[in-house]
Amino acid sequence: MNNNYEGREADEGSASVSLPSSNQTERVSSERSGLTEAGNALQQIDGILELDVFDHLKRFIQLGGTPHQVISYLSESYRGYPEMCRLLVHWLMLTGTNAEEITDMVEDRIKESIINRFDANKVDKIFESDLWPGWLVDMIEKPKWRHLLYQLSEKNRDCLFLNFGIQRISLTGYDDEIASLPLAATYFSVYNRLMMNTIRKALEAESESELTERLTRFSKLCDHAEHTFLYTHAILYSLFDRPGGHRVKRIAQQLDEIRRSRGWEEDDDGSGMSSEIAQIAQGIKFHLLNIHDYSVVHSSIQAILLSETPSSADVRKLYQAYSEKLSSSFSNYSLESALPPPVEYLRDQNLLRKLVVELFDPIKQVSPDFVYYYCWILAYASCSKDPRSVTFRSSEVPDISFFNGMNDTVDAVASSINVVQAICQKNYFGFELAGSPSDQILEFLPHPVISIGVLHWIRVNISDPDRLATSWNTKSLSTQLAIWREIVATHPLQRFEALQVLISGFETDPSLGPLDALNLKKLMVETLVYLVECGYVMPVISQIEKWAPTIDPSLTRHFLTCLLDIISPPFSRAFLIPIIYLIARVRVHSSEQPDVFLSFSEHILSNESYSLPEESIKILQNLKVTQ
C-alpha cells in the first residue's frame, strides 16, 4: 500500500502544472473591470446621446464585449428625454405661448437641475479625456449660463472645471461683469487682469465722476480679501515713480476715499478691511517711499496716523524736521548738506485730513502755541515744489534750485490758513459771519488746502441738528452755502467732497418746525442743482434717486423743476432714464412751473434718436395726457 501511494506521489510530482503569473492576473482583472465600466456607461439612461458614447463602445468591443450586447444596452437604456422635451415645447407653441417665454422656462429648469445635481468630482473628469468641452464656449456667450458658472463657483471653489471656466470668461472680455463678483478675488490670474484693466481705464477717465464710477465697483473687489487689498496697494505704490505716476497716486487716493466714505476701515464684522490691515498697507507704502531713511519723520507720521487725535508734539517734530533745513536761499548749499525730507511723505491724505480736522473743526481746540505748526505743515504739503521722485533716497542729490525762495511762499500760505482757521474756530453766526469774516474766507478760498478745510467747517455746522437749526434761524446758512458754491465753482476736484457735505446736511433733521425744516431742505436742493449746473451731473442725479422713495415728494418735484429750468438738449440716455423715473414719482400738476415738464416731455417724445425704453415713453405720454 505504501508502495502504491509513493508511486502516485511520484507520478503527480512528475506532471507539469502551469499557473498564471501575477501580471497576467492583474491584466485579466483590469480588462474585466474596464469591460464592466464601459458596459455601465452604455447602459446609463440615454447613454447613446452622450458625447463619449463611441469611446465607450470601442472599449467595450476591444475588451471582449459583443455587438449584440452593445445594441441591447443602448436600446434598452434609451428614454428619449430630449425628444420628449421638444414635443412638449411644440405643444406649448401650439397653445400660443411665446417662444422666448418657452426658452426661458426650459433654460431655468435645466439651470435648476444642474445646480441641484452638480458634482464637482465628476465634472473635473472632463480634463482626463481628450475631448475639448466646446459647449463651454457657447455657455460663455450667454449671460444666463455665465451667471450659472458664477453661482456654482461660489459653492464649489475647488472645482478645476469651474476655475477654468471663470478664467475663460475673463479672457473673453467680461471683466466688468466679473468685477462685481466677490469670487473674482479668489482667482489670482483673474483678479490681476481685472486690476490692470481697472487701472488702465481709470487712467483714461475724462472726469472725476467717471473715475469714481469705475473705482467704486472695483473697490469692493479689492477689499474682499486681505491679500487682494495689500497686493493692489503694493502695485499702485510701486507705480508712483513711473511716468504719469501722479495719476496712479490719484487712483490710490480715490480708492482710499471710497473706502473711508463707507466706513470699511472701522468695520469689525468681517465685511470690510480691519484697521490693522489698513496699517499694513500704509507700511507698504512707506517702505516703497523709503521713509525709513528719515526716522523722525517716519515715527511722527506713524504716531499721528495711529492716534485718534494728533499729538501737537508730533506735529512740532514734523515742522522742525522740514523747516529747519529749509532756507530762503540755497546759493551756498553744499552737496554734503542735508535737504528737507521729500514732501511726498506729508502728502498722505489720511495725515492731511487729520490736520485739517484739528484746525477747522470748531468743536476741537488746538493750543495757540502749536497752531502755526499745523498751518505750516499743511502749507508746505500743498504748495512746495520738490524735484525728487517719490522713491528718492537720501544718498541722492537733486537740483537744489527748486528750493530757492520756497520758505517765503510757504510762510505766506501758512498765514492765510491761520487767518481762515481762526474764523472757523470762532464759528460766527448771523450778521457776524456775513460781514468781514465771510469776505476773508472768500479771499483765501483759491488755496485748495483752505477750501477743503472750509468744507469740513461747513459739514460740522450742517450735520448737527442744533447747529443746523441755529444756522437757519440766524440766516447764516445762506452765507455758508454761498461759500460752498464758490468752492464748487473754483475747485472741480473737490466737488465729490462738496456733495458729501451737502448730503450730510440734507440727511440731518434740524431742531425746527415742519415748515421751516421743509424750506431748509428746499434750499439745499437748490444748492444741489447748482452743482449740476457746474457739470457734476450724474452723482447728484443718483443721490436724488436714492432719496426719492423716502423724502417728501415736494422736494423731488422742486429739484426737477429747478433742474429742468436750467438744462437744454441734447440729453444723454443715461441722464434721461433716471430723470423720467423721478418724474413718474411726483405730481407734476402741483408744480409751480408745470410748463417746464410739458416742454421737456414734448421734446423727448418728438426725438426718436434718444431710443428710450417703452416704459419711459409711456411715463412721458401719460404726463402729456394729464396736462
Image: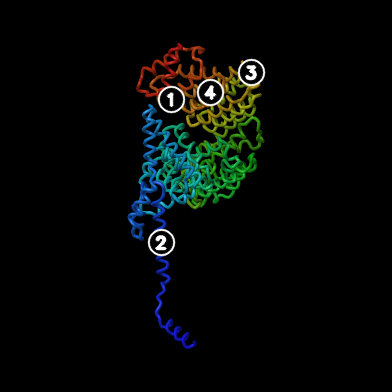
- Horizontal side of 334 relative to 58 (left or right) equals right
For label 3, the residue is 473
Mark in front: 4 vs 1: 4
Where disc 2 sits, the SS reads helix
Three-letter amino acid code of the residue under disc 2: Arg
Q: How many numbered circles are shown? A: 4
Q: Residues within 10 Å of mark 4 (few under 14, many from 20)?
A: some
User: In terms of depth relative to the viewer, which is nearer, 539 or 432?
Assistant: 539
Q: Which callout, 4 or 2, points at the residue further toward the start of the chain? A: 2
For label 1, the residue is 575
* Residues at discs 2 and 1 in contact (Cβ within 8 Å): no
For label 4, the residue is 548
Q: Residues within 10 Å of mark 1 (few under 14, many from 20)?
A: few
**573 versus 151 height, above or below:** above
Cα separation, mark 4 vs mark 1, equals: 16 Å
User: In terms of depth relative to the viewer, which is nearer, 559 or 536?
Assistant: 559
Three-letter amino acid code of the residue under disc 4: Ala
Mark in front: 2 vs 3: 2
User: In terms of depth relative to the viewer, which is nearer, 215 or 545?
Assistant: 545
Identify the disc placed on residue 32: 2
Percent coordinates x, y for residue 376 in the rendering: 57, 37
**92 versus 161 height, above or below:** above
